[in-house]
Amino acid sequence: MLDAMRRHVANILVKILLGLLVIAFAFWGIGDYDIFGRRSQSNTVATVGEKKISIDEFKRVYQEEMETITRRLGRAATPEEAQVLGVVPRTLLRLTGVTALDLHASNLGITATNEIVGQFIKADNPSVIGLDGKTDMAKYAQVIRQSGYNSIQAYEEARRRDLMRQQLVETLGAWTQPQQFAIDALHRYRNEARVIEHLTPDFSKLAVSEPSADRLKEHFEQNKGQYVALEERKANLLLVPREAALSRVSITDDEVKAAYDRAKASYDVPEKRRVAQLTFPDKAAAEKAYAELSKAKDFNEAAAKAGFPAADIDLGLLTKPEMIDPKIADAAFSLKKGELSKPVEGQFSVVLLRIGEIEGGKQRSFDEVKAEIRDNIAAERVGQQLQALHEQIEAARAKGTPLKEIAETLKVPFQEIGAVNRTGKTDDGRAVIAHADGGRIVEAIFGATPGVETDIVELSDGGYAWFDLLGVTPQRPRAFDEVTAQVRTSLVEEERRKEIASRVDQEIDGLKPGEGLERIAKALGGKIERSKPVKRMPEALPPGITTPLLQQAFTMAKDGVASMPTADSKSRTIFRVADVTAAQSPTPEEEAALKADVARQLRIDLIDQYVAGLRTRYGYTVDEKKLGEALSPQAEAAN
């Protein structure tokens, strides 16, 4: 569905700030103060209808997209990679889409009360609830910061819009029924199986002629882009990760026992229920469905036929507080196992409920929970330690104290980074920053401008990082003499791959129609392996078969023979499609699952078309100048 986008200052200012946070949180949505003690500027980077998208909003979503790429690559993406991957257009498409939805929801009069928004935020962020059952305002402020928002109002309004959008699209396409021919075609595609014979000759002893000096220089000139020295940056880094603060927390046994006595009930295991929820546009539709489903012998089968496959209606195992709508929660926790409710009119929609499983709650003794309590107290106090360290470091920074001296005084990790490139590594390929957020820190270092004060990097574990950019070595082309050894290695490997491919192709071309791989095995060596029947999208690949090889095999006819480079490119796997097995008729469970998959995709496509239509209906513009400012490191530093 839609991406819901769930996801300092001196002592006196922090105390004032926390007081403001308490007042604002009490009213859930009244707060409008910047977490850092100021109000945000709202420069417009794009407009949908009359609704504006600020630079801050763009930056937050852009950062989310960049972090997704970082997780996939295992390192920070370069600006060139971000451009190739279309991060900016994707960010704008996402923002204009949700803004168009917000406009339509507003035009239709859809809203969400402060009470519902508060319940939603608490359910989505249970960490903000302290040991005493009350809201921990410091943790709430941290959640807001880590979500990319700089004020309570901005965060709470974003959550309100999430709920409003959810109401708007909740039933869109709910009654969509995929046609049978599509189900049959998808089943045949997914469940056709192939048996693959394959062998991988050992070419490790294959030698190629030593390239001449002229050939090396020619290869270098043709591939200069492979041998550039990437831009490198020098920096000092001070890290205050969560574990550094956690090691300073001290907790006595008496404190643990006192915490248990204060909130015994909070340590009990609450009852959980597996809730199936069928959503309807109105009460009449719900009553009609109830009349049919209440008589069905097999509820799941009947619900699937009515357009409610099990995978779509299962909300999972929930406690009562985890259910946002109080009316629906009350109804769900009053049902017996297997009982179907009559239509329930909730805050947002009319639903039918059915309980598939009940996990009873229980009271837990002190001995059972004392380790958990100790961890909870430590988790609470680590935030205080982090805040204290943050204030001490910022105060020292304000006085001009070098990071190294601060680290020595406070006994926190410090690192002198002599050189790091955009990949987070040194020129010889060694990783520079041994931390889970190393990629983000490197990204910040490369987003900084020499001579401009750098911002704090907030770590994913709640800690912080400070750095000073000391120098920049621009990217430069390398001379041939610097990389002669690399050029030789690259050229020799390239020639080996060409020779291997030539020998393999020659053997394949010599096969007669329908002939097996025995003659090739005899000529090139290697043991012939035969896979079990394998589908296009197996849970696990058979030994010796790579994903590209499997994809290629499914484009070939029976008895077809081809080859594919091995994962390390040091050999080639020769393979033959030994057998093709057509898909058998689906079982009722398989057909129901397929229908659910196709229906889900149809709904996604329908929502995409709906959002595209709204975007066209309201119209949108992009301010290229403000977009450039949003992407500029200098603008970031100025903010």
Image (cartoon, rainbow, N blue to C red):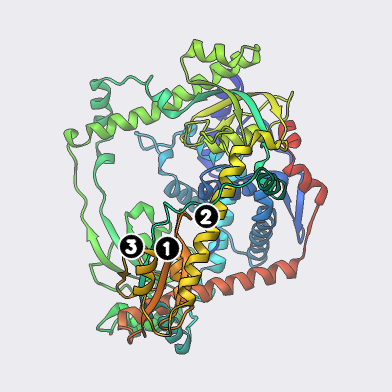
Residue 248, quarter of picture: top left
| Count of number-bearing discs | 3
Q: Nearer the viewer, residue 579 or 52?
A: 579
Where, quadrant-wise, is the C terminus in this rendering?
Answer: top right
The answer to whether residue 574 is left or right of residue 3 is left
SS state under label 2:
helix
Position of 170 with respect to 627 (left or right) is left
Cα distance in 3D space between marks 3 and 1: 8 Å
Residue 28 placed where, x, y %?
53, 44
Closest to the camera, between mark 1 and mark 2, is 2
User: Considering the numbered disc 1 on the image, is that residue within a helix, a strand or a loop?
Assistant: loop
Taking the image as shown, residue 510 lies to the left or right of residue 364, namely: right
Q: Nearer the viewer, mark 2 or mark 3?
A: 2
Q: Which residue is mark 2?
A: 496
Badge 1 is on which residue? 546
Dots 1 and 2: beta carbons under 8 Å?
no
Q: Amino acid at mark 2?
A: Arg
Q: Which residue is mark 3?
A: 543
Which x, y percent locates residue 416? 56, 21
Residue 43: percent from left, percent from top: 77, 44
Task: Check disc 1 and give the amino acid type.
Answer: Thr
The span from disc 2 to disc 3 (Cα, nearest Å) is 25 Å
| Above or below for 230 versus 90 | above
CA–CA distance in space, label 1 to label 2: 21 Å
